[in-house]
Amino acid sequence: MDKKKNIIFTTVALIVLFGAACAAQFGLDAYLRRVANLCMIYAIIGLSLQIVNGFCGQFSLGQAGFMAIGAYVVGVFTVPVELREKVFYAVPMNPLIADIQMPVWLALIVGGLLAALVAFLIGFPVLRLHGDYLAIATLGFSEIIRIVITNAQSFTNGALGIKDIPPLNDARYIFVVCAITYIFVTALINSSYGRAFKAIREDEIAAEAMGIDLFKHKCMAFMFSAFFAGVGGGLYGALLGTVDPKNFLFTLTYNFVLIIVLGGMGSITGSMLGAILVTGGLEFLRVFDEPLEVFGMAIPLFRPGFRMVIFSILLMVCVLFWRKGIMGTEEFTWEKFKKFVKNPVGYWKGDEHHG
Amino acid sequence: MKAKKILTALLASVCVFGATATMASAEEVIKVGVFLPLTGDNAAGGELELRGIKLANENHSTVLGKKIQLVVQDNKSDKAEAANVVARLIEKDKVCAIVGTYGSSLAMAAGNIVKENKIPAVGTSCTNPQVTAGNDYYFRACFIDPFQGTVMANYMKKLGYKKVAVIQEVSNDYSVGLAKFFMDAYKKMGGQIVDVANYQTGDKDFTAILTNVKAKNPDAIYAPGNFTESAMMIDQARQLGLKINFYGGDTWETNDFLEVGGDAVEGAVLTTAFGREMATTKEAKIFLDSFEKQFKGEEPSALTALAYDAYMLVYYGIEKAGSTNSVAIRNAIAANKNLPLVTGKTTLDVNGDPVKGAVIKTVKNGKFVYVDFVQPK
């Protein structure tokens, strides 16, 4: 299949998926719609982490902080002005921003840009570090962002959190943002910048010898990553209708590390798959939390919390058998899909290089 | 290859199980949803509350001639999960009312969903005023931060303190809320706040804060916050030679507070929702008896009592509504007056917050001892 056909297929698939999103908006019940929306939001943030960790090979753990920035821009600026007095009941809102109200789409973009700006400022000193040190530094900065938000009470309402954010539980809206993220990241990775990212991932010294400006490219990857994390965080805040600083503890980042490791470090479609498996899977496993009776006997294992045990076991099994994640560094392509449809068993057998 | 087959079989069996395992209940029941943090950071609190709800359900299991079935779900102390799980309770389990949760932020995440679906929810120990404000479908069994802060301000004023320092746990909404309303009330009564110091959850060294506070020479310190941090702070204050007394909120009422603080926390005073000595209602006796039977030798925590009450609010709501129509239940919960609950006679105000008294306790010989009971105005 040539490139043109691929594009047509992908476009058709996106349109079909958009149709599915519309159907989800009207056909699915509120619970499933919420899970679907959360899957898409986590996919966006997973993709954002993938840019730095998967493609550029820099181990960053700052995603929770960038999400917090996006979520707070949405939180602070989309709450209707007349409701703000009630929300900021402890310390009144700073008059500088008290009258500024934005529509959600604008707040998302502003949140993303602000996150990217902060990423630039942080990246300047931090991106000179490598490996574990970079991970620790980014994690530290994400905590700093959270603590600044906690203490800037007149802007963010501090620990009390913000509620009454106009809820955005619209599968179509979130799907469009997710699709744009997907298309952008795919285009970025297939561009010369993307190839430079991959070169840096494989061998920094060799990449530098080839004339790649390491710092510039790392910084760029870091900023793009922060932008999408900000947008994803904004959607997350809007989906829940409330934000508070404790949401964005560094443990939140591990969610997304899990998603990209499970999906495959360095695979765009992998991280989307990972997001769906982790989010949807956890909800699916809820049956293990509910009491189960077999022939009138209640099985004691089936109590709240049991699903986390099952989930951990499944994760361990996955990591044991798919060491590079489910997709590895491969992508979903229509060629492979065609091969798979024609001969699923043969495809599976011939696919050993994956695991 | 073999391993992969086993793996595939394992995954498939989990999937099949997940798809087929559905609860089949033939008899007609009234379903009440419960969502609590049973795993994650707040699991300890969630577990204590689940006890209370289960006890209440055992003692009052039928209403309108039908059995009440609890559908318990875990929200993993995570806001996104809390929202998911409430949507699930409403859509999949078709519950007519919801009880929960520990943690105000978790309750706020659920707020929009119960409001949209018109399903009444009764919070157990979510004390942030924002939980019920502007939401007709969210009620709660606990008193809110402003009330607790004000009660302590009145009490401390009565003790004759003129200058008080406030130390708040700035990353904790509960602590910030209590401190804010304490200061408002205290200043209004002519008291003086000489210092406001902040610390973060998880801090271990408070000597800098305490040295500053000591220099201002206050008569007492109001320091609502997490029990571990507070106990450590009081201990360090004693080491610094700070002899004045500490006052706090209901989070202190845990064994950990006594264990970590040891001798240092002797004399510390706190406000709480439940005290054995004030348990005068009939329901309180039933609660204490059944608690004693199930958890021998344990002292019931205020969280357990509040969760019990949250269930009872729903129970009386359904009884008064006379149907399982969720809007009717909502109106009945709002309209009920002077309900004889475990933590005292309870009426809900226009916001859905209870108007009831607070218990003041102090630490004496390594135990929490009842001091006073403050009626609401």
Image: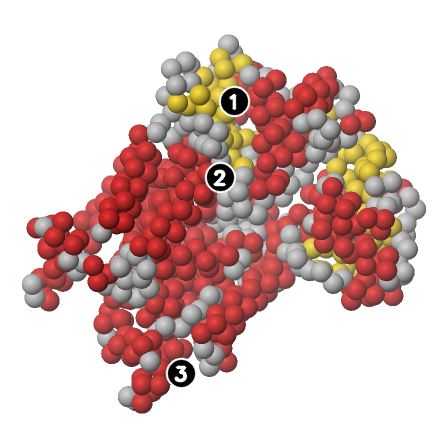
Residue under pointer 1: B329
Horizontal and vertical percent position of residue A268: 28, 62
Q: Amino acid at mark 2?
A: Gly
Image check: B183 left or right of A98?
right
Q: Amino acid at mark 1?
A: Ile
Residue under pointer 3: A215
Residue A63 location, quadrant: bottom left
Spatial distance from mark 2 to mark 1, Cα to Cα?
30 Å
Q: Chain of mark 3?
A: A
Q: Residue at x 63, y 43 (%)?
A: B128
Residue under pointer 2: A305
Spatial distance from mark 1 to mark 3, Cα to Cα?
62 Å
Which type of secondary structure does the marked residue at label 3 adopt?
A: helix
Q: Residue at x 68, y 24 (%)?
A: B291
The reply to the same-chain question for discs 2 and 3 is yes
Tell which tag, 2 or 1, sits nearer the viewer. Answer: 2
Tell which tag, 1 or 3, sits nearer the viewer. Answer: 3
Image check: A118 left or right of B335?
left
Tell which tag, 2 or 3, sits nearer the viewer. Answer: 2
Horizontal and vertical percent position of residue B63: 54, 14
Image check: A259 left or right of B200?
left
Which tag, 2 or 3, sits closer to the chain's start?
A: 3
Which type of secondary structure does the marked residue at label 1 adopt?
A: helix
Q: Residue at x 33, y 49 (%)?
A: A277
Q: Residues within 10 Å of mark 1 (few under 14, many from 20)?
A: many
Using the rendered image of the protein, determine whether residue B193 is visible from the camera's viewpoint: no
Horizontal and vertical percent position of residue A335: 12, 60
Q: Residue at x 39, y 22 (%)?
A: A294
Q: Chain of mark 1?
A: B
Q: Quadrant of the C terminus of chain B?
A: top right
